Image (cartoon, rainbow, N blue to C red):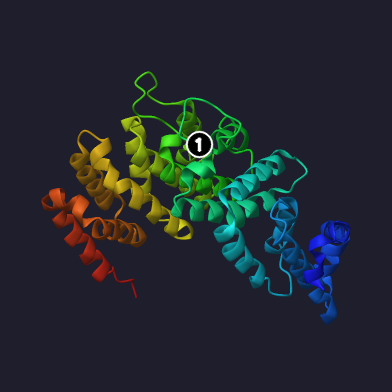
Amino acid sequence: RSSDLSEQKDLVNCLSSVWRSPEFQQRTLMNLVVHRWKEAKLLVKCFLSYIKSHHKDVGLLFELLRVFTKRYMPSFLFFKEFLDQEVALKYTPDERRYVFFKFVEFFENGNFPEDLKAKALQHVLIPTFTASFAKGEKEKLLGGSPNPDQDRDGDIISVFIARVIDADNPLATSDALRILLLQFSALLVEKAPEYIHDPANKLQKQGSRLRRLTAYAWPCLLPRQCEDPAARYHGHLLLAHIIAKFAIHKKIVLQVFVSLLKAHAVEARGVIRQALEVLTPAIQARMDDGNTVLMHWTKKIIVEEGHTVAQLVHILQLLVRHYKVYYPVRGYLIQYMISSMQKLGYPPRSEE
């Protein structure tokens, strides 16, 4: 019985060797015999019963994430529920920290597959950190009070920026892994900005942590370097959070805002909207002439890029969502909004 595995470490090690073996994984995926479908599902249930009483066996937990990397015949919804309800919500801050540092070890291991690194971020780290921040456990989770100018081995943000993200070669990982690293970075900037940079430090306009995070996201502004829309606009999302939290160079603020105004890629619509939700209210605070910037560039894109229906819808939705931000410049934009809506209401007829 799976409930008897909690003290059977040797048996669990034996079963985990079977689980990791390429032969088993291939057989599970390819075999059409019904009773073979259940093997993977039963193994995962056995492992979960063991992990419930052995939270520090993080390696086994990460290995189980293989079920999200391939198309298995059985449903593993119960495993996703375990991650969401047990790992994300019930682990203590010390256990969450232990999971993070084990992730760093696996991340630096060249033999650990990139797809599993991505799934560890997606299904374990991001949900657990989000839940911990919501509970007000920031200081316990991150390793003490904020000290962004000093690197410490126990400081999670210091370790993440120094050992996980590669600011010197940000495109070294796959797009899937890079997207999750950008998401995790954005979460840290949003929830723990004081651990990244201290604005009160007048000797450093930009601390080393903030510089490295900005450099990691920078290729998203260079389309030739970052061609995948999802990866590109997750980089914009990180930069939007950085701009919202810190006073950085105004040219960067303008470049990110204009790029997002022009962005209407359907496959990245969600993250584009999310980035604009963060950035648009911050424009007035980060630019000396914030209202002029809002008015000039929004009008310019409506006039010059408005021949595309998707672009018009994108801009009009932005104006509706952030009507309070645009209220001071409404008089300059209203005629262009009316003209745009007329284009949407009466599309040009195709020649018969």
At horizontal 46% and vertical 54% (from top left) the residue drawn is 135
Q: Residues within 10 Å of mark 1 (few under 14, many from 20)?
A: few
80, 258: nearer the viewer: 80
| Quadrant hosting residue 68 | bottom right
Q: Is residue 82 visible?
A: yes
325, 184: nearer the viewer: 184
Q: Is residue 158 left or right of residue 191?
A: right
Badge 1 amino acid = Gly
Q: Is residue 125 left or right of residue 288?
A: right
- Asked if 42 appears above or below 207 in the picture, the reply is below
Give the residue at the far top of this rendering.
Answer: 203
Q: Which residue is mark 1?
A: 144
The picture places residue 256, in percent across and down from the top left corner, at 37, 41
157, 251: nearer the viewer: 157
At horizontal 61% and vertical 38% (from top left) the residue drawn is 164
At horizontal 35% and vertical 49% (from top left) the residue drawn is 278
- Asked if 46 appears above or below 300 in the picture, the reply is below
